[in-house]
Image (cartoon, rainbow, N blue to C red):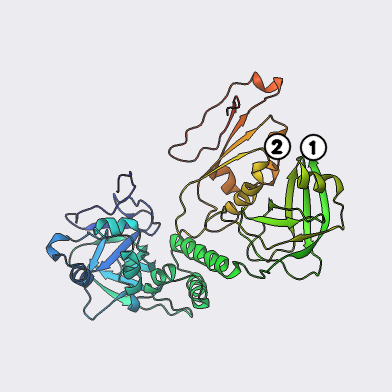
Amino acid sequence: MHGHKTLTSIVRTPPEGPLRISKEQGISNHQSAAHDAQIYAFFAHHYDFWAQKLGVSHEEWDWCHWGENLTLRSSTPLDEGDVYTGDVWEFDNGEPEKGVVLQVCSGRVPCSRLAWRCKQKSSWLVEVAETGFCGVYLRVIQGGEIRAGSKACVIRYEGENEVAVSSTAQCVFAPPSPPSTRELAENILRHPNLQNMNRQLLERKISMTDGEALAEKNAWKGWREMRVSKILAKFADVKSFYLVPKNETPLASYLPGQFLPIRLPSGLARCWSISSWSDPASLSSTYRISVEKGLTASQWLRESCREGGILNARCPTGRFHLDWKPQYPPRQIYISAGIGITPLLPMLQAHFTHATFCRTPAIWIRIARNGLSGRLFAHKIPNTPETGEYLQRITFFTQPRPASTSKAATTTSLAGQPSLSSATCCATPTS
């Protein structure tokens, strides 16, 4: 698709004969590429609707063109707004109590594969989601056979939380900022029968909504007095300074990777990256900056600044930060050298604690003098199952210690699935 190898099961033709269905395997000889629901159903009259909308002949689209396993006609008008998560569909094959029983577990969220299949731009997916005419996902309660002409009766869900399947796609594609978007997502997530993949999508939507709400919250204009609450020197060349507001009012939220402009008592101003990250759902009470040995401003901080001292700071800013707006963020590559880890550290911390990114593969390429300096803040990367599975680390030493030079460099593949291994290489500095 668009020049890239893509895993998908959307390109199919209607099979001959019945579909054999089991509770354990779903449809026999069927392999899903991405979705964890066992069966996808689409309404036949939507083919007429979308063919007319897009100006194509219905004959150009055979059944299964939208990737469905079942194409349905209803005796009374039935759309995704009339189908509810938890509904049960009982198919009658002529044998009492031996028909297939399916349960609605969500509505389809249209993706780029569908746009490609229908020869449309990705922007078209917004229209698809708004109509809700996306189809229905189902899980198998009782197996058997379904063939062309099979009939089913619909048993309505009787739980407290009624969720029309059309609302899932509408919520995922809705603007994140209105409170109604978060409320709708929370309502859908409360449903016990919701498909796992859509559960993850909606959890990401909530994290995006929270991020929008917190952006620049408690921001201030001009300079503000900050008190140095703590100074740590865990590494020989680097000191970390913890700053809290002098007047104890909340600090502004920030994005991982942004920096803090600071003015010293001499009037000299400089920007330092905020080198830590906390859950965006809770407002920051402390900023941490980490400063390496250097001249002028850095030297004054390291040699003259004391705990309890007052510094002036502007609001956090900067455009070099982690972007968690994409619904499906691509593989991330982080590259740092020496103290350059300070903006990447909060990015990596956020990567593996944020709902949008925690299962996104990442590669961290790190350049250090030797194994000692290579440990700079490495212990601050979250130690989670996702980190072990999705983060690949590659380290280059420019001046390795003698004990390191005898070790053979290992290599890892940057293609395919993320590797659990780490590469350690020796390198010669270049201009």
Report if residue 408 is visible in the image: yes
Q: Depth check: 359 or 424 in front?
A: 424
Q: Position of residue 7 (x, y in %)?
A: 34, 47
What label does residue 375 carry, if any?
2
The quadrant of the rendering that contains the C terminus is: top right
Q: Is residue 261 above or below residue 42?
A: above
Q: Position of residue 353 (x, y in %)?
A: 60, 55
> Is there CB contact under 8 Å for labels 2 and 1?
no
- The residue at the point 79 percent across, 69 percent down is 248
Q: Amino acid at mark 1?
A: Ala
Q: Depth check: 98 or 221 in front?
A: 221
- How many numbered callouts? 2
Q: Which residue is mark 1?
A: 236
Q: Position of residue 352 (x, y in %)?
A: 59, 51
- The residue at the point 61 percent across, 53 percent down is 257
Q: Residue furthest front?
A: 267
Name which of mark 2 and mark 1 comes first in the sequence: 1
| Closer mark to the observer between disc 2 and disc 1 | 1
